[in-house]
Image: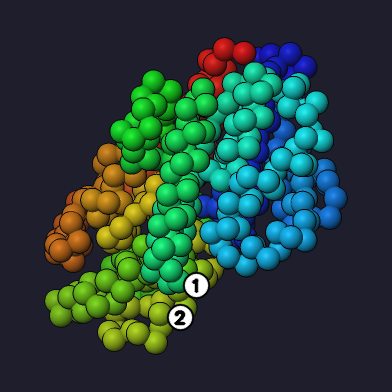
Amino acid sequence: MTTSNSRKTLNVYYHDDVYEDPTSTSMFVKRLSYELAKFLNVTLFVYSDVQHVRRETTLGVPLYRVPRPRIPIFRLIRVNPFLTRVYNSLVAFSPKLYLFSKKIVDANYILCVDTFCGFTISLLAKVEGKPLIFRPNDSLLSFGLQLMAQRSRILGILMVAYGALVEFVVSRLSDLILASSRKIMYLFQSYYGVRGKICVCHIGTEARKSGKNRVDVRKELGIPQGDLVVLFLGAGDWLPNQLAIEYIQKTLAPFLAAEKSEVLLMIVGRGTERFRNSITTNNLVIVGEVPDISPYLEAADLGIAPMPVMGGQSSKVIDYLCAGLPVVATNEVAGTVEPQVGLFVSDIEHFHIAVSRLLKEETNLNMAERITSESLKHYSWNAIGVQTAKRILALEV
C-alpha cells in the first residue's frame, strides 16, 4: 500500500441534491469517494446554495462547497426548470471553479458525476490536460419524463435533447465513462460511439440487517406471521414509481386478493402517502416515508419492480437482492442490473401472474443467503470502489 503523499490525486465535481437519500447523486458521490480514498487522495467540489466557499469533511474526505454565482439578470430565467438547468450547466460552475485553478492543475484525475455540470468540467479538464472520468446520471430521462407528464411536453423534449447534446460532447472528451447501469452503457455505445472507454459503476449498497429476529421485526411492523409480504420500495414523486404504484393498486392487489391468498402488499417510500386514498383492497398497505428500510426488507418475502418505463438504474432491485429477497421485475427494470440468481423477469401484462406463481414456489422464497452472497459481489460498496479505482489508476497521467 502506498503512502498518502505518494498516491495520485482525484478531484470530484458534482451538483448538490435536494434529497440526501441513499439513491441521490450527493450520497452516491460521498460513498464512492470514501471507497476511492483508500487508493487515491480525493477532494470533493460541490456547488450549492451557500454564501461563501466552505470547507467541510464528509466520511473523512475533504469537501468544498462552492456558491452559485448570484447574477441578478439570471434570476428571471431561473423560474423555468429547463432554463435553470441550462444556466447551471453553462455558467454556474465556471466563475467559482476558476478560483480553484491551482487545485485543478495539481490533480492527477478529474471525475465529474453530473451530466449538466459535465460540459464546463470537461472543458476545464481538457484545457489543463487532465484525464477526465465522466459518470452521467439518469436525471435527464426522469426529469424530462416528469416535465412531459406534469408540466410541458415541449420542455420535457427540450430537456432530454439538451442533455443528450451535453452527454455527446462530454463523452467524446472523456477518457473513461462510468455508466450507472448496463442499459446506460449500451445506449452510450450505440449512440455516442464510446465502446472502448465505458464500463458500469452501479450505486452500491450493503446487506441491511436490523439485528433483530425476523419474527420480532414482523411483530413490530404489525404483520401477521402467516402472511407472505410483497414489498415495493420507491419515492412517489418519480413518474416510473407512480406508474408502478397505480399498477399495484389497480391490477396486482385485486388479483392477489381474488386468489384469497394470505399475501400483504407493502409500499414504502417518500411521497407515497398521497396514494392512500386510492386503496381499494384490504391486502395493500402504503407505509410512506420511513427513517430506515431495513426492517421492511427483513420482513418481506418478495420484492417487486413493476415499472413499465425506466431510467438508467434501479436501486430498489439492488436493495432487494442484497437483502436476500427474490425479485420480480419488468424487462425495462431488469435491463439496468446484472442477471443473477433470484431475479425473475416478466412483461407488465403477465407481471401479476409471475408474482402469484413465485409466491407459491417455496424453493424460490428460501434462497436468501445465496441471493445476498452473489449480489454483494456486484453491488457492495467495497467491490465497486476496488473496481472503479483500478480503472481510474489504469488511465495514463
Seen as rendered, the residue at the extreme right is 52
Q: Residue at x 62, y 67 (%)?
A: 79
What quarter of the picture does the C terminus occupy? top right
Q: Residue at x 66, y 23 (%)?
A: 127
What quarter of the picture does the N terminus occupy? top right
Local packing at callout 2 (Cα closer than 10 Å; few below 14, some 14-19, many 20+) is few
Local packing at callout 1 (Cα closer than 10 Å; few below 14, some 14-19, many 20+) is some
Q: Nearer the viewer, residue 189 or 345?
A: 189
Q: Nearer the viewer, residue 365 or 104?
A: 104
The numbered dot on residue 271 is 1
Q: Mark 2 and mark 1: span between their CA atoms?
A: 7 Å
Snapshot colouring? rainbow
The numbered dot on residue 340 is none
Q: Amino acid at mark 2?
A: Arg
- In the picture shown, does residue 199 fall above or below 163? above
Q: Amino acid at mark 1?
A: Gly
Q: Is residue 145 visible?
A: yes
Left or right of 204: which side holds 230? left
Q: Residue at x 78, y 42 (%)?
A: 96
- In the picture shown, does residue 153 fall above or below 138? below
State which quadrant residue 70 falls in: bottom right
- The percent coordinates of residue 374 (x first, y second) are 35, 37
- In the picture shown, does residue 4 fall above or below 362? above
Q: Secondary structure at mark 1?
A: loop
The numbered dot on residue 274 is 2
Q: Residue at x 27, y 51 (%)?
A: 332
Instruction: Determine contact: label 2, label 1, CB under 8 Å.
Output: yes
Q: Nearer the viewer, residue 140 or 79?
A: 79
Seen as rendered, the residue at the extreme front is 73
- The percent coordinates of residue 186 (x first, y second) are 32, 35
- The percent coordinates of residue 246 (x first, y second) are 31, 74
Left or right of 204: which side holds 339? left
